[in-house]
Structure formats: structure tokens, C-alpha cells
Amino acid sequence: MMKKILAKDENIIAKIICFILLVFVYNFCMGCSSQIEKNTGNDKIEKSYSVTDSTGTVINFDKKPEKIISLSISTDEILIDLVDSKRITAVTYLADDPEISNIVDRVKSIPNRAYGNSAEALLAMQPDVIIAADFFKQEMLQTLRDLGLKVYVYKTPNNIKEIKEAIKDIAILVGEPNQAEKLIKQMDSKLMSVKDKVNSIKPSEQKRVVFVRSNGVFYRPESSFMDVCRHANVKDATEDLHYDKSCILSQEEVVRLNPDAFVIPVWNYDGKHDPEQIKAEILSNPSYQTTKAGRNKNVIMIPAARALAVSQYTVDAVEDIARAIYPENFNKKESL
């Protein structure tokens, strides 16, 4: 009899324990579900993540950086289309120069300007991350890191494909990968529009151009300008050369290349390099007068903000050059 009572009591106790466990599990699951719904509904889930820059340096974040400093005009322009301007603590002083910047009006609300040569000034801004190009001196970057600052170094792009990759990498850095996809789609749309107008031009019919700086015709083994020309179905005549490093070409070399047009970026960066004066010097140069470009007085002036852009705005330079070299193709399409 006593055994039956004890067995019955043990059975009741077991049921009570099971009930308590079920209630606990239910409440725990409901609590988790409620928290997930709360976070998802407000779209404010903060996750820690890590990124690796072009130097192999790993940078860890507990959440998206809210105070970002850019140390190059390229990242100034990329960032402004990836994040709310309130998240950008500083851009470069070049962002305010309308001859080289495509975002002058959009950066007016950003409070600070970074010159990249004062570690103390950058530290005082207390950034969550600093974005620097790979052409910055390693000593400077290390000084910033020694001060406890997070520094992301990106590889300077040489072509439009690499610009897209840089946009994706920076978007991941700032926690906005979807914005990168939107931006790249806009770039592709512009490139496709230009391609539609110039695609009928055969390689043998391509016009040849050279890029002119204040001190002469510029050559670089692989440059963003070469790639811009390819997308515009134009030939950068200096591609025929195969030097190991960048240089200013001699007048004799330019004559041998025999370009159809000289391309000048419009940017009087120090008040001493007036593009109109450079144009006049080219057209009055006896050697250059023997080229096709010289005989036809074909000097193309393109805003430096587009011609020298290493950002999403590079695709605008593609349209500028294509339109200047093949105006009939654009006029024909636009008149339809």
C-alpha cells in the first residue's frame, strides 16, 4: 500500500517538474521571438563583424561605424552615396573644389575637413574608422594605428572594374552592401547607354586620343583614363607604348602616335595652370600642328571632376569623351 502511494506521489512530482520545464521553455522561446520581432521590425539589429583591408589588416566592429573620416576625394565621393552624410565626420578639402569634386553641394553639411597630415587633428575627431588610399605613407598610417585609431586602407583602382570592387569593399566596411549594388547598377546603366551609341564603331574606325597634363602628354602603363577610353570605344594612343613606368612623353613620341584629339582635364589647381593656356600652347606648337589633332585643332576640354574621377563618377567621363569624339552618334540617337 505504502509503495503504491509513493509511486503515485513520484508520478505527480514528475508531472509537476515537466510542466514547470514546459512553461520555462515556452517563455524563453516567446521572449526570443519577441526580441527578434522587435529588432527586425525596427531594422536595428547590430551585429559585430570584421573586414580585411588591402594591406591584410583585420579591423573589428561591434556595430556599423557612425563617425567615418575619408582621406581621399575618391572615398569622399563613394561614401556620400553609401551612407547618410551624418555618419561622415570629415572629408578632404578637395571635396569643396568644384573643378575636381562632384559632390560640392552634398558635403556642405559635413562639419570637418581632413588633410591627412595631422594625426592629432584626426584623433581629436574621435572617428570610428578612417579610410585611406594605399598611396599614403606607411609611417603615417602606422602612427594613426598606434594612437588606437582604426584605419582601413583600400587599393587605388586603375579601371572601372576595380572601382566597382572598391565600392563593394567600402560598402561592406560601413555596413551598407545593398547600397553598393544600387550604385553599381546606376554605373552599369550609364555605361550601357554609351555603349548603345558607340558600339557600331569598328576598331579600325576608332579615334585616337592622348591625355594632356600641364607639363605635357602623360603616359601610364595602365590608367583609369585608358579604361575610360575603352568603354567610350576610343583608343588611348599611348597604349601602343610599353614603358615600365609613368612619364611625360617627348614631342617626337606624340607626333609618332599621331592622335586625333588632345584631351585636357579642366582644373587650375594652383592658379598657375590655366587649361585655356595649355590648349593655346598645344595648338601653337609646331610639332603638334603636324598631327591630325593639331591640323584639325581638335582639343577636348573635360571637367577634371569627371576626367580624373576614381569613383562612380568615372562613368560620366566615359560619356563625356564618347560624346566629344563621336558627336554625330549622340545627336543621331537623341533626335530619334
Image: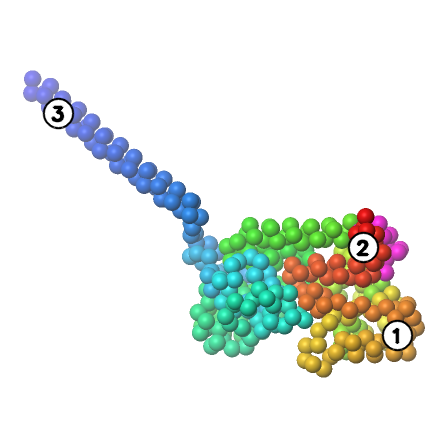
In contact (CB < 8 Å): disc 2 and disc 1 = no
**Label 2 neighbourhood size at 10 Å, few (<14), some (14-19), many (20+)?**
some
Residue 205 inside the magenta-drawn segment: yes
Judged by depth in the image, the label closer to the viewer, 2 or 1, is: 2
| SS at badge 1 | helix
Q: Residue type at mark 1?
A: Tyr
Task: Determine which residue is flagged by label 1.
Answer: 288
Residue 23: give its label. Answer: none
The x and y percentages for residue 44 are 42, 50
Task: Determine which residue is flagged by label 2.
Answer: 330
Residue 165 inside the magenta-drawn segment: no
Task: Determine which residue is flagged by label 3.
Answer: 9
Residue, x 44% and y 74% (percent of image)? 124
Mark 2 and mark 1: span between their CA atoms?
28 Å
Left or right: 45 in relation to 157: left
In the image, residue 155 sits, relative to residue 272, either above or below, namely above
